[in-house]
Image: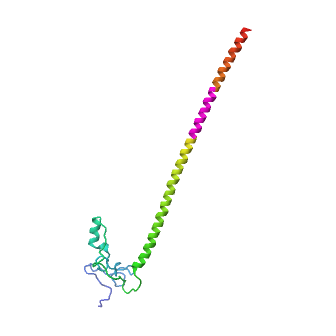
Amino acid sequence: MSSASGSKTSGGGGGKKEASGSGSGGPPPSYPRNPMEGRTCYKCGDPDHFANVSKEYWEAKESNKPFVPLLLGIGRTGRTMAPGAERRSLSADRYTARSESDETNTLMREYFARKERARVEKIEKEGREKAGREAEAAKQEKARRKLEKEAEKKREQKERDDQLLYLVRMEIRQET
């Protein structure tokens, strides 16, 4: 029997055989085995993890202190390159993307701030217009009531004048 027969077992895995037939015993080829492979922690310099995995990061997070790596002595030196890849540094790409992202975020904040100011101004303007309409309506109602009172007074005065005129005519008739 050869060792490449496709019946590999993992240590302590219960001896299950892989049904994929690839004999790799790992995940499908579309998934990388370790996404951190080839990366180096900028805090401690150890390979295959980031600083958020380190003990200092979590201690700083628990005590609500900012986690800032020491730049001198400890940490990575030089560039981290993916295995076999020769290209410009990722930090330069990230800086460009980050500056574009920061610029976009700034523009979006300004846009939403302007939009909020416009919304608040519109609400305030509508409030002022409503108050103006209500004041105008109250003014017109007051003027209407005043005219009604004046008309009522004139009507009452006319009735009194008519009664007096009637009485005067009656007096004149009685005298004649």
Queried whether the magenta region covers residue 79, the answer comes back as no
Find residue 72 and report its horizontal and vertical position in percent: 29, 78
Q: Is residue 1 left or right of residue 88?
A: left
Find residue 59 and report its horizontal and vertical position in percent: 26, 68
> Could you tell me which residue is drawn at 59 percent across and 38 percent down?
140
Residue 161 appears anywhere in the view: yes
87 vs 163: above or below: below
> Could you tell me which residue is drawn at 64 percent across and 26 percent down?
154
Nearer-the-camera pick, 153 or 64: 153
Work out which quarter of the rendered image holds the C terminus and state it: top right
28 vs 175: above or below: below
> Could you tell me which residue is drawn at 48 percent across and 61 percent down?
112
Residue furthest to the left in view is 12
Queried whether the magenta region covers residue 138, the answer comes back as yes
Residue furthest to the bottom in view is 2
Q: Is residue 31 left or right of residue 75?
A: right
> Could you tell me which residue is drawn at 42 percent across and 75 percent down?
95
Work out which quarter of the rendered image holds the N terminus and state it: bottom left
Nearer-the-camera pick, 55 or 140: 140
**What colour scheme was applied to this rendering of the protein?**
rainbow
Find residue 175 and report its horizontal and vertical position in percent: 72, 8
Q: Is residue 153 left or right of residue 14?
A: right
Nearer-the-camera pick, 139 or 54: 139
Residue bounds of the magenta highlight: 137-153
Find residue 68 and report its horizontal and vertical position in percent: 31, 71
Residue furthest to the top in view is 175
